[in-house]
């Protein structure tokens, strides 16, 4: 009798251990270190002197897009789509509605203002980085 209780405990423990290890791992955008400054006077970033414009920069997981939302506000997002991020599909500005970013792989759309999902299969917003505008010429992007 005692032996069968031990066997039952062992079998139940083994089942719990294996069922936890077989759970589907969530596919998330990896957290990578970001910390750089761009200068609006640099020809590469001069388009950001106009509200509504954006630029791509190297960094993050699939590149970073910086968008000038107002005279004093910039936003920066990782371009890695949050739907199946292990595919590393990079979002692009939507050619039809310039207030959105669109994933060319799954068709998900994200807001250029806050990175929130607007349409498609993605369920999580784009990874957003902090921005600091000095009010003059530099924008620091970091996490």
Image: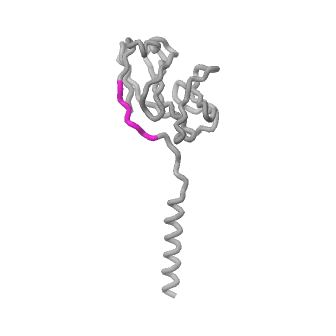
**Viewer-side residue, 65 vs 13:** 65
- Magenta segment, principal secondary structure? loop
Residue stretch rendered in magenta on the structure: 30-36
- Name above or below for residue 78 compared with residue 13: above
**Residue 56 on image: x %, y %:** 47, 23
Q: Is residue 125 left or right of residue 49?
A: right
Residue at image position (53%, 68%) is 15
Check if residue 33 falls in the magenta segment. yes
The quarter of the image holding the C terminus is top left
Residue 116: which quarter of the image? top right
Check if residue 19 falls in the magenta segment. no
Residue 41: which quarter of the image? top left
Residue at image position (58%, 24%) is 100
Residue at image position (51%, 81%) is 5
Q: In this view, does 92 lie to the left or right of 60?
A: right
**Residue 30 on image: x %, y %:** 45, 41
Q: Is residue 21 left or right of residue 40?
A: right
Q: Residue furthest bottom?
A: 1
Q: Is residue 117 left or right of residue 13?
A: right
Residue at image position (59%, 31%) is 103
**Residue 1 on image: x %, y %:** 52, 88
């Amino acid at each position: 009798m005692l032996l069968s209780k031990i066997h039952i405990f062992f079998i139940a423990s083994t089942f719990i251990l294996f069922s936890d290890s077989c759970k589907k791992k969530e596919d998330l955008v990896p957290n990578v270190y970001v910390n750089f400054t761009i200068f609006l006077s640099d020809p590469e970033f001069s388009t950001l002197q106009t509200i509504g414009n954006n630029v791509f920069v190297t960094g993050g997981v699939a590149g970073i897009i910086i968008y000038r939302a107002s005279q004093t506000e910039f936003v920066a997002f990782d371009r890695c789509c949050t739907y199946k991020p292990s595919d590393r599909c990079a979002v692009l500005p939507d050619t039809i509605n310039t207030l959105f970013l669109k994933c060319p792989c799954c068709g998900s759309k994200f807001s250029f203002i806050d990175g929130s999902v607007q349409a498609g299969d993605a369920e999580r917003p784009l990874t957003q980085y902090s921005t600091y505008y000095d009010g003059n010429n530099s924008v620091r992007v970091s996490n």
